[in-house]
């Protein structure tokens, strides 16, 4: 062993048998025994239930169709812009669109189809998102929500309110009848 404070001569050297012995290693720490898995099922996240996936399916289908329709519309616009650029050896007094490659009725039909495709896919995406947000999975769910907000069929009515409306209607009709009879008596004179 070398030391800065020694003269370089070592007086104590380890025995050859001690040098060959492996150093004692401490035993590894005991690991806790694994606990058995819980048999009680944890509540599944409402984000990944089959009902939620069905609702989100409509949203993602709409988003996919919207992306596809946007790509199709971009390609159509790029094609029309490219057709408007004059060719290299084209005469300068004629525009590229008057060269005979534009059919206005077909162009109008194509624009209508692209606009319809964009609109339908956008509203499909909005409908799917609203269905997921409102937890609507079928028409029965919509009916149930509407009935809950409107009230059950055959609900009890407010008798006092109905009586008040009947009295008001009777007063209005009496007044109208009195005015009509006054007018007829004045006409006879």
Image (tube, grey):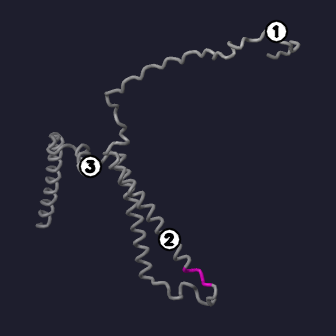
Residue 39 versus residue 137: which sits nearer the camera? 39
Residue 84 is a magenta residue:
yes
Q: Nearer the viewer, mark 1 or mark 2?
A: 1
Q: Are marks 1 and 2 in contact (CB under 8 Å)?
A: no
From what the image shows, is residue 22 above or below residue 123? above
Q: Which residues are magenta?
A: 83-87
Q: Nearer the viewer, mark 1 or mark 3?
A: 1
Quadrant housing residue 61: bottom left
Residue 91 versus residue 119: which sits nearer the camera? 91
| Image position, residue 126 (x, y; %) | 39, 55
How many angstroms separate mark 2 from mark 3 (CA)? 39 Å
Q: Residue furthest front?
A: 16
Category of crowding for the residue at label 2, using alpha-carbon neighbours closer than 10 angstroms: few (below 14), some (14–19), many (at least 20):
few
Residue in the picture at 36% in, 52% down: 57
How many angstroms separate mark 1 from mark 2 (CA)? 91 Å
- In the rendered image, which quarter contains the C terminus? bottom left
Q: Nearer the viewer, mark 2 or mark 3?
A: 2
- In the rendered image, which quarter contains the N terminus? top right
Q: Which residue is mark 2?
A: 75
From what the image shows, is residue 38 above or below residue 51? above
Residue 184 versus residue 74: which sits nearer the camera? 74
Q: Which residue is mark 1?
A: 11
Q: Which residue is mark 3?
A: 142
- Assign a secondary structure to mark 3: helix
């Amino acid at each position: 062993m070398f030391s800065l404070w020694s003269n370089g001569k070592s007086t104590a050297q380890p025995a050859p048998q001690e040098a060959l012995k492996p150093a004692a290693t401490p035993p590894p720490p005991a690991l806790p025994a694994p606990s058995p898995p819980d048999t009680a099922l944890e509540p599944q996240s409402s984000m990944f239930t089959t009902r939620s996936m069905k609702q989100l399916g409509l949203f993602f289908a709409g988003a996919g169709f919207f992306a596809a329709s946007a790509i199709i519309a971009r390609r159509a616009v790029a094609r029309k812009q490219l057709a408007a650029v004059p060719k290299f050896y084209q005469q300068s007094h004629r525009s590229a669109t008057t060269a005979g490659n534009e059919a206005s009725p077909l162009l109008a039909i194509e624009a209508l189809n692209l606009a319809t495709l964009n609109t339908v896919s956008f509203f499909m995406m909005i409908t799917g998102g609203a269905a997921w947000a409102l937890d609507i999975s079928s028409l029965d769910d919509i009916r149930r929500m509407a009935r809950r907000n409107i009230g059950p069929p055959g609900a009890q009515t407010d008798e006092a309110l109905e009586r008040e409306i009947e009295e008001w209607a009777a007063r209005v009709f009496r007044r109208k009848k009195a005015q009509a009879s006054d007018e007829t008596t004045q006409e006879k004179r």
